[in-house]
Amino acid sequence: MTGIRTRLCDRLGLQHPIFGFSHSIEVTAALAQAGCYPIYGAAWDMPDAIAKKTALIRDLVGDRPFGVNLLLPASVGNETDRTAVEARLPAAHKAFVEGLRKKYNVPPATQTTLFSSQIRSQQLFAEQIDAALASSANAFASAIGTSADTIARAKRAGKLTISLVGSPKHARSVKAAGVDIVVAQGHDAAGHTGPIGTFSLVPQVVDIAGDTPVLAAGGVGHGRQVAAALALGAEGVWLGTAWLTSTEHKLDERLLRKVLAAKAEDTVISRSHSGKTCRLIKTAWSEEWEAPGAPEPLPMPYQQVLTGELLAAINEHGIEPLMYTFAGQGVSYFSEQCTVAEIVDRLMREANTTVAALLGQRATA
Ligand SMILES: Cc1cc2nc3c(=O)[nH]c(=O)nc-3n(C[C@H](O)[C@H](O)[C@H](O)COP(=O)(O)O)c2cc1C
């Protein structure tokens, strides 16, 4: 389909000004095939898995570009002894988590995840960065604060550097660090978000970024928002929630039903996932942590040491009431399962129609 293209499409050889974030290899590959720029989310992977998965993605996408994303919060320290940290967690928090396990009859997990076996630390981040930079990924995207040194290293490794920011302050610091693309991720987004809404954040970040291209992220689910993002000065959009509902993602069907049924107001900002504010689908998990008498979630990385095993068990055994995923306010626009290509096609058709209507209005005004 022909239609809206931006400077960034020409520079990166993209058919559409859409960047797609996903933790799924299949979605990553489908996004590349659909003419978008895929970004594989590697924050939940151990370094050796990053090497294996990026190699698999390269096989699937051929010469098409793809990126790899890490979450690198500077506030996390360097404690690496998970058992010692676990032993020091407050007794009331442990009792609350054990109470949830009993109340919902959650059997123990038989498989480990990164969060049930590790603790987020600067050492783990350094090993994840090494694996990402050694991979064949064309881009390195990072969120929740990336040091200027890491951006410089990624550039020296030949990667296109991308930083997700949620505030003008962070936009200024990644601009000063020389990042290649800034993603302005508003409060509407799935995952770790700041307090500023996408519509307010994007033009501010565009002004700060100057000649550095900006992508708009958070709540995008309709082509009108793609057109609006371009009107706000962005050169493209960055979507996450959309792909959860794709056929390629193969989301657990209990969770998929929740996502397809959810509207914007069924998402909630909660610290119960990681200790940092995060937008999730509202389920018994977030509600239990909000209930009177529930403890305050612990700061990152301790919350995930506290809950890692229970969450692994909830997902492994499909404990439906407690299952959740990150989801943005644009979830309202995804009420049936489609392929990645169908989602991209719908967004671009809607965006093209919107722009054509605007141009028609201006011509006759
Ligand atoms: C299931 C899921 C997991 C996510 N994990 C990460 C992550 O590991 N790193 C990151 O930078 N962003 C992550 N995000 C946020 C996305 O990068 C993106 O900014 C966000 O989804 C955009 O808003 P939208 O969901 O409304 O499209 C995640 C989003 C979803 C839906």
Image: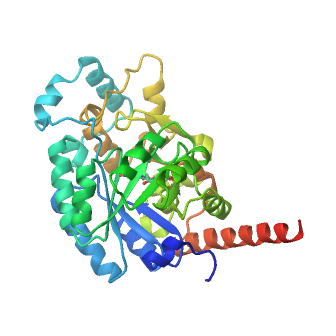
Which residue is most to the right? 364
In the picture, measured across the screen, residue 286 lies left or right of residue 235, that is left
x and y percentages locating residue 59 in the rendered image: 28, 80
Q: At 53% from the left edge and 53% from the top edge, which residue is drawn?
A: 206
Give 285 or 169, whichever is nearer the viewer: 169
Residue 293 to residue 179: above or below: above
At a point 51% along the width and 39% down the height, the residue shown is 282
- For the N terminus, give its image quadrant: bottom right
**Along the viewing direction, whichever of 14 and 10 lies nearer the viewer:** 10
Q: Is residue 174 left or right of residue 204?
A: left
Whether residue 254 is visible here, answered yes or no, is no
Q: Residue 275 placed where, x, y %?
A: 35, 33
Determine whether 228 is above or below 194 in the image.
below
Identify which residue is drawn at 66% across, 58% down: 228
x and y, in percent, of residue 109 in the image: 24, 45
On the question of residue 6 being in view, the answer is yes
Q: Position of residue 197 (x, y in %)?
A: 57, 42
Quadrant for the C terminus in the image = bottom right
Seen from the viewer's position, the closer of residues 140 and 340 is: 140
Q: How many marks?
A: 0
Indicate left or right for 187 with 180 as reference.
Answer: right
What is the quadrant of residue 347 in the picture? Answer: bottom right
Q: Residue visible at 39% across and 33% down?
A: 272
Front residue of 210/49: it is 210
Give the colour scheme of this rendering: rainbow
